[in-house]
Structures are given as structure tokens and as C-alpha cells.
Image (tube, rainbow, N blue to C red):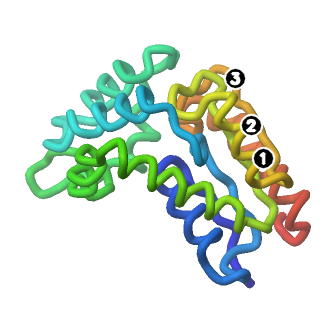
Amino acid sequence: SPPALVGASMGGLTSLLAIGEGPPDFARALVLVDIATRLEPEGVARVLDFMSAHTDGFASLEEAAEAVAAYNPHRKARRTAGLRKNLRQRDDGRWYWHWDPRFLDHATRSSAGESLVQQERREQAAQGVHIPTLLVRGGSSDVVSAEGARELQKLIPHAELFDVQDAGHMVAGDRNDVFSNAVIDFLRRKLPAVS
């Protein structure tokens, strides 16, 4: 049977577009993690600045943890265990994010006009989402505002919203316990075969 898609940030946008523009049986449920049709430009710029600043990797997991802590000063602990899942150590011994940094070339060159077209596309795709949907928003997010979350709910009226207090854009990294429980609860309620 089709999967439930859980996508954070860029993965959430990709999932939204795939479901909203794709065949009706593409997925059985959608979980968007701190991403919506309307994004706060300052927050997006901050994410892109953080990502662009570290394309040359990190000398150690500890250095990566320090960079994340500087981006997320509200985080209590500098943990390296979770970073091991998101970083890959290459032959040069440095640790790199597991995504392709070339996508930043397009993201940082997007014009205001192109951003408007992208927002319209996201809104049209959202109107095509007819499966169970959950938006998990970081309560302190600078990428998805409370108003942006409400706008998504207008486009996807059946969508549920779950705010994770004390979490920013990196919801799972900030409060993985609360995030995981919210997603599992949603999937169990909407897809009873999930256990």
C-alpha cells in the first residue's frame, strides 16, 4: 500500500508537491514538519545562511554540534549522537551534511518574483491534498509562523496542527520526544494498521 510521507523543511515541500500534483494514490498520509505554503523570508534566509556557511564540512562532530548550537541557541545540550545520522564522514576525514550542497545555488539565487511563483505552486498543490495531513510546527519557528500554519489549514481544511513548544525549525532535533509522539499518534489514529 502507499506510504505515509513525513517531510521536514525541503523534504516537506517535496512531499507536498508530490502529493498535491501527483496521482491520487501516491501516499496515504502526509506529515509536514515546520514547512507550509507561506514561509517567513527572514527564517528561510537564516536557514540558507547556516547551510551555506558549512559546505566545507566540519573537522569533528563536536565542531558540527557547536555550529548547530550557534544556529539554535535555545537548545540546552550540544549533542553529537543525533548529528551522526545527519552527517557523513568522507575520505578526507571531515564530516558533511548528507544533502547535496549544489541545491543551494538555486535556492540562494531565487528572485522575489520566482518566490511568488513558488508560493502559488505550493498553494495549488496544497489544495490538491486530500489525505490525512498533519503540520508539526516548531512553536519558536522563524520559518513557519502561526499565521502561516493557519493559512495552510485554510488550503487543507482537514489538516491537523501540532505546535511543539520550545522547538524551532529543527523540530525533531529540538524536541524529538514530543515530535515522535505527535507523529506516531497521528499515524495510529489516521492509519489504524500502523502499530
Cβ–Cβ under 8 Å for marks 2 and 1 = yes
Circle 2 residues within 10 Å: few <14, some 14–19, many ≥20: some
Between residues 76 and 160, which one lies in front from this camera angle? Answer: 160
CA distance separating discs 2 and 1: 6 Å
Residue linked to disc 1? 154
- For the point 69% across and 23% down, the residue is 165
Sequence-wise, the earlier of marks 3 and 1 is 1
Identify residue type, mark 3.
Answer: Gln
Residue linked to disc 2? 150
Cβ–Cβ under 8 Å for marks 2 and 3 = no
- x, y percentage for residue 171? 58, 35
Is 79 situated left or right of 122 in this image?
A: left
Label 3, secondary structure: give it.
Answer: loop
Circle 1 residues within 10 Å: few <14, some 14–19, many ≥20: few
Identify residue type, mark 1.
Answer: Lys
Circle 3 residues within 10 Å: few <14, some 14–19, many ≥20: some
Q: Quadrant of the C terminus?
A: bottom right
CA distance separating discs 2 and 3: 17 Å
> So how many labels did they put on this image?
3
- x, y percentage for residue 81? 44, 38
- For the point 64% across and 36% down, the residue is 148
Q: Which of the numbered marks, if any, corresponds to residue 22?
A: none
